[in-house]
Amino acid sequence: MASPDQLRAARALLGLSQPEVAAAANVSSMTVKRAEGSGKPAASAHAMTAIARALESAGVEFIPENGGGAGVRLRKR
């Protein structure tokens, strides 16, 4: 599962607002905020997955921890 930092970075790479991601993931803007680590309670695993899938559909790849740290990148076209 993507971390809050990865979700925030992915959104920034794509230049999307929290409301835009929320609409794409079919969740509320507050849920996106909580998923990115800026609210309580934390977002559910289901919401985190929906947000990550929406960001992947928009063109990012989540990079798992591989000794150099987890991250995100734009997918090759």
Image: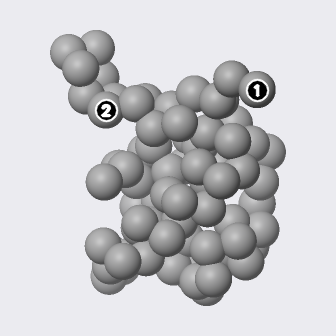
Q: Say which quarter of the image contains residue 46.
A: bottom left
Task: Say the numbered circle drawn on residue 77.
Answer: 1
Q: Which residue is mark 2?
A: 64
* x and y percentages locating residue 22 in the rendered image: 66, 74
- How many other residues sit within 10 Å of disc 1, few (<14), some (14-19) or many (≥20)? few
Residue 38 visible, this angle = no
Residue ID at (69%, 66%) = 21
Tell me if 69 is positioned left or right of 7 in this view: left
Q: CA distance from mark 1 to mark 2?
A: 20 Å
- Element type at marker 1? loop
Q: Is residue 30 above or below residue 72?
A: below
- Element type at marker 2? loop
| 31, 53: nearer the viewer | 53
**Three-letter amino acid code at disc 2?**
Pro
Location of the N terminus by quadrant is bottom left
Camera-side mark, 1 or 2: 1
Q: Is residue 3 above or below residue 18?
A: above
